[in-house]
Image: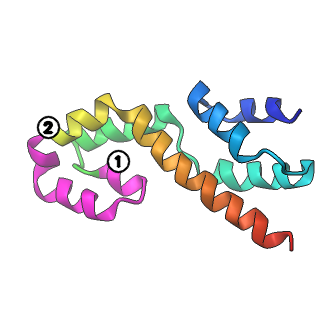
Amino acid sequence: MFDSKFMSLPGISPQEYSYLQTATNGLTEQQLQTFLMVYSGKRKNPSDMLLFCAIGLFIVPGLQRFIVGQIGMGLLYLFTAGLCFIGSIIDLINHKQLAFEHNQKMVFESLQIIRMGSF
């Protein structure tokens, strides 16, 4: 019923679409609109993540890990040149999964914000 609103998210994958449908099941239209507003500000587009991974490989090792909030891994990548470039190359290949894992956490956080606001 509210599914078309998810399509406004740039670069949404079928996996993320399905996850959002399941996670937002039972929300009212107002809650869903608020959720989308909060979530869209927190989510990472997979194509943006590809750019961050490329920059992380060639310029600033670990940038992609800092962007998704993995500070410890970001520091490890920074001080080991992306784990001798191997970790950065793996992240470049798996950029969609890296973005999806981050977005799953942001769905949970956004839902918590919505639920706290509607007593």
Decide: few, some or many residues near mark 2? Use Cα within 10 Å; few <14, some 14-19, many ≥20. few
Residue stretch rendered in magenta on the structure = 63-85
Coloration mode: rainbow
Decide: few, some or many residues near mark 1? Use Cα within 10 Å; few <14, some 14-19, many ≥20. many
Instruction: Indicate the position of residue 54 as horizontal and vertical percent values.
Output: 30, 35
Q: Is residue 105 above or below residue 55?
A: below
In the depicted view, which residue is nearer to us: 95 or 31?
Answer: 31
Residues at badges 1 and 2 in contact (C-beta under 8 Å)?
A: no
Q: Circle 1 is placed at which residue position?
A: 64
Task: Say the numbered circle drawn on residue 28.
Answer: none
> Helix or strand or loop: what does disc 1 sit on?
helix
Which mark is first along the chain, 2 or 1? 1
Quadrant containing the N terminus is: top right
> Which residue is drawn at the image coordinates 75% and 48% (left, top)?
36
> Which residue is drawn at the image coordinates 69% and 46% (left, top)?
23
> Which residue is drawn at the image coordinates 70% and 58% (left, top)?
111
Q: Is residue 36 above or below residue 117?
A: above
Q: Is residue 94 magenta?
A: no
Residue at far top of view: 14
> Helix or strand or loop: what does disc 2 sit on?
helix
Q: Circle 2 is placed at which residue position?
A: 86
In the depicted view, which residue is nearer to us: 48 or 94?
Answer: 94
Q: Is residue 81 magenta?
A: yes
Total labels: the figure holds 2
Task: Kindly report which numbered mark, 1 or 2, lies closer to the viewer in this rendering.
Answer: 2
Instruction: Specify the amino acid type for callout 1.
Output: Gln
The chief SS type of the magenta part is helix
Instruction: Specify the amino acid type for callout 2.
Output: Ile
> Which residue is drawn at the image coordinates 69% and 65% (left, top)?
112
Q: What's the distance in space between the residues labelled 1 and 2, CA to CA?
A: 14 Å
